[in-house]
Amino acid sequence: MNESPGADGAPGPDLRAVTGPADPDAPPDADGAPGPDAAGFHAAWAAMLRTGHGAAVRPGVLNPLIARTSELLHRAAREHPFRPDLAGQVGALLIDNQFTDPQLLADAVQLLQRRPVPDDRGPELSGAFAAGWAAALRERTLREQEAIRLAADTARQEIEKALRVSEARFRALFESAAIGIGLGDTDGNILAVNRALGEIFGGGPEDMQGVRVNDLVHPEDTPGVWEAYEELISGKREYFQFDKPYYRRDGEVVWTHLTVSLIRDDDGAPLYQVAMLEDVTDRYRLQERLRHQATHDPLTGLPNRAAFFERLEKLFEDPEPDVRFGLCYVDLDGFKIVNDSLGHDMGDQLLTVVAGRLENALSPLGHMVARLGGDEFVVLLENCRGEQEAVAAAKTVLAALTKPVVIGDHRLAVGASVGVLERRIATTTPGAAVRAADLTLYRAKEAGRGRWTLFDPKENARAVSRYAVSVRMPAALDRGEFFIDYQPMVDLASGVMTGVEALVRWRHPQLGVLGPEEFVGVAEETGLIMPLGRWVLEQACEQAADWVARFGDRAPRLSVNLAVRQARNAGLVGDIERTLRNTGLDPSMLQLEITESTVVGPEDEALKALHALVDMGVSLSVDDFGTGWSNLAYLRDLPVSNLKIAGSFVGDLHDPAKDTHLGWRIVSGLVSLAHTLGLSVTAEGVESRADAERLRLMGCDLAQGWHFGRPVRPAEIARRIAEAETFENGSLESGTSGTFGSGPES
């Protein structure tokens, strides 16, 4: 079939071709068989309806429609007499199936006029079709208009009804609401209020007549209330909420939860303001009581730790550059004795009296006094004028506690130690300031109690470093942060390295490499010395066994320090026996160094463990001999074979402020004493060739110090063992000491 442009410019069916091959679905000619004209018209009619003049119609509907309308048109063209109603039915059917495009009407009329029909019925046929199509379209339009009118009328009635209901509901809600509601204009005039709002203010709705919103200001209004109000009435915000106090007519204060909303006109301009007020006075007072309980100590009534830190942190929120503050950290002296001997009830009464004295003495000065817990108090000085004011506050604390506290029949003498911190706010943080004041307090206690001590940045830095060490130490072993260096110990007669001392080091990730003097004390205090000492012993014995395997008799003897807590541990002998067995090190190659305080008497259990070690083949040495008040009788009972003269003795020999001659006589006396007791002597801290030679002439057996070498890694010790072979028969005069003298002299 040829194509011609449709209404939208797209190709459409060629309405001139109304003949063609017979279509079996086409309506029959007059003789009952499909004719070529009927079949051609049916095909053209179907093509026209399928071009999409109407709404999308499913094939299941479209195909029967095409057949029905084609049949009706065929009958209208052939039946006698002529029945225009059949063509009119076709137009109505198309309208009912959404074929409402005017272009369809034009195409259909054109197609009908071109179809050969008897009796020149073409114009009548197309006119009847067009009339039926137009009438059906008009009816459809009228029905739709009526439906729209009815829907609009129904909607209007429902809106009017809903508006009446809404107004009634609003009036009922407004009048009977439990919360106060008020309506005002944007000029601040109150136009209407309900009964509940009048009752909140202690009157009736009529009492609010003539009142303006600005008349309801309260001195304790929440910051920002009136800024938000101005923004609302100017249209910059839609609503705001605040907790706000008001004065009642009787002068009492009522607390409310206030919500103010803006109502705009049709153009969006601010028109009214609606305020809703809920009376929350009871809740506010309950919250105040709960807050007081949460921020005050129930025993003394003073602000508690939480309140103190809240106040302190507020100082740091936005301080002026030069604003200063002060802290006096207070701890009672001897309070534990009162608590333990007279009972907690007496202790509580004492704390209450102390708190009252501190409050009465310091609050008039504008200082905050808080109880942090137990017998610890703190005084906060805001806008402090300098150290003098902070020290004056500390003296006031001590003065307030000079008189005994009388409780019943008891006169309790109570004192305090005070740590004083005074700083510029910009130079610290709340947490750092509290820690510094606390550390300063303990310095005051260590200094003798009953005094105040001023913050010292250097002492604080040392204490903070000590704290950082103690915090990380528990996990440092697991992280592999510890390692061992070895310092040579030289036979002064031959110049040969006969031993090494194992010295543990800590590779701290923040503080760098730390020597034992920087963390062993902390390890002793915390009990971590036990796992640390066990690890050092295992690692050092394993290394010594390796040197024995490599160098035989030339391997140095291992010396390991034994902490007091280790020596007093019941499992010491078992630990050392197991370590020697696991590493394969001969007990004679191990020397343990103990301090003079390890054993406190002949009945000490530690003494039995030391004898057991010596029986095993391990030798003992007394480290830092002469630094304490040694009981020489203990040397008779101790199973030691060596004394180590403390390095401080040798170091003092070069102090111009001290008698050098007397110093050498003391060292000589110590050497003679040791030899008299059948002990060998090792001198520590030897840093010059002259000192080494003089010690040799005195008969000192061994020495260690920077002159012979600093503590080094195991590989360096192995190198020195290998190189020392050529010097085995040498002496200090022949230069043997050069093998071990790589460290700088101090």
Image: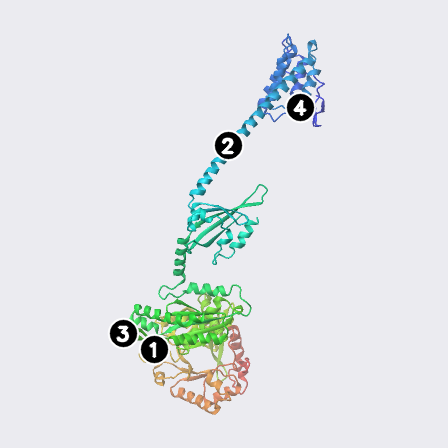
CA distance for labels 4 and 1 = 122 Å
Is the N terminus in the top left, top right, bottom left or bottom right quadrant? Answer: top right
Q: Nearer the viewer, residue 372 or 9?
A: 372
The quarter of the displayed image where residue 61 is located:
top right
Labels 4 and 1: the sequence-earlier one: 4
Residue type beneath disc 1: Leu
Task: State whether residue 20 is above or below residue 572.
Answer: above
* Residue 341 coordinates in the image, percent (x, y): 29, 72
Q: Find disc 3 in the rendering and name its residue.
A: 409
The amino acid pointed to by label 3 is Asp
Mark 3 or mark 4: which is in front?
3
Gap between marks 2 and 1 measured at Cα:
105 Å
In this orientation, which residue lies closer to the viewer: 401 or 450? 401
Q: CA distance from mark 3 to mark 2?
A: 88 Å
Question: The residue tagged with tag 2: helix, strand or loop?
Answer: helix
Which residue is located at x 43 percent, y 63 percent?
Answer: 307
Instruction: Say which of 69 and 508 sits in front.
Output: 69
Which residue is tagged 1? 607
Q: CA distance from mark 2 to mark 4?
A: 38 Å
- The structure residue drawn at horizontal position 69% and vertical position 9%, both measured from the top left corner, is 118
Q: Which residue lies under the disc numbered 2? A: 158
Asked if residue 24 shows in the view, the reply is: no
Q: Amino acid at mark 2?
A: Glu
Camera-nearest label, 2 or 1:
2
Residue 291 percent location from the top left of the image: 41, 59
- Label 3, label 4: how many angstroms apart (C-alpha)? 117 Å
First in residue order: circle 2 vs circle 4: 4
